[in-house]
Image (spheres, rainbow, N blue to C red):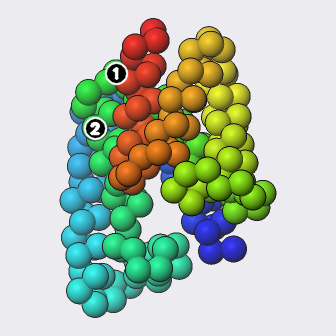
Amino acid sequence: MHESLRQIVHLTFGLGIAGFVLLFDRDIVLSVLMLALFVGFILSDAISRGYTIPVVSPIIAGLERRDAVPGKGALFFTLGALFCIVFFTKEIAFVGLVALSLLDSVTTLAGLRFGRTRIYNHKSLEGTLAGFAVTAAALCLLLPPGIALMTAAAAAIAELVSPVDDNLVVPVVACLALTLLL
């Protein structure tokens, strides 16, 4: 249940950030994400030093994986989003963040529930295929089908093989693929 809740929060906030990127001016988005990153690092550092922060500490304790840096996933998601906003158009960044939100959550949830065939880095074929399928279907609502499929495939491969946190890599790979394909 813990990981399921974590992934639902990841999906919800990820799609919310993607929508925020699409709806608001680039400068506002950059300012808000930079502020969130700054505050997030302060909170993460304080919690890792043993401070209890009302409201924040229980949320992080309930959602974070065991032995992880407090808020690491959220911080990396924000950093990945910032990179995409700085180096790509907001429309492309939006697609990259949608891809990350859907792919990461669905891959994990499907892998936990249905994953039997481990293919790489403790990840399952079933989770990877489910994440790819859902992401591709969603991107087909935003892009021509061929481009959506190739973007989803690039993102799914990045999610599967990346040696670093997928919140950093997946949106950038999706944005790069989309930029090359358009």
**Where residue 182 appears, x then y in whole percent?**
45, 9
Give the residue pinned by disc 2: 83
145 and 52: which is toward the camera: 145
- The answer to whether residue 66 of the structure is visible from this angle is yes
Give the residue displayed 45% in from the left and 19% down from the top: 178
> On the picture, is 138 further left or further right than 87?
right
Q: Nearer the viewer, mark 1 or mark 2?
A: 2
- The answer to whether residue 97 of the structure is visible from this angle is no
**Where residue 144 appears, x then y in whole percent?**
62, 11
Residue that extends furthest to the right in the rendered view of this protein: 114
178 and 51: which is toward the camera: 178
Q: Is residue 153 above or below residue 43?
A: above
**Where residue 12 appears, x then y in whole percent?**
58, 52
Q: Residues within 10 Å of mark 2 (few under 14, many from 20)?
A: some
Q: Residues within 10 Å of mark 1 (few under 14, many from 20)?
A: some
Q: Amino acid at mark 2?
A: Phe
Give the residue pinned by disc 1: 89
Q: Measure the C-alpha gap from mark 1 to mark 2.
A: 11 Å
90 and 117: which is toward the camera: 117
> On the picture, is 154 further left or further right than 43?
right
Where on the picture, by quarter, is residue 152?
top right
Give the residue displayed 65% in from the left and 55% down from the top: 118
168 and 43: which is toward the camera: 168
**Where residue 107 appears, x then y in whole percent?**
63, 49
Where on the picture, by quarter, is residue 116?
bottom right
Give the residue displayed 28% in from the left and 82% down from the top: 48
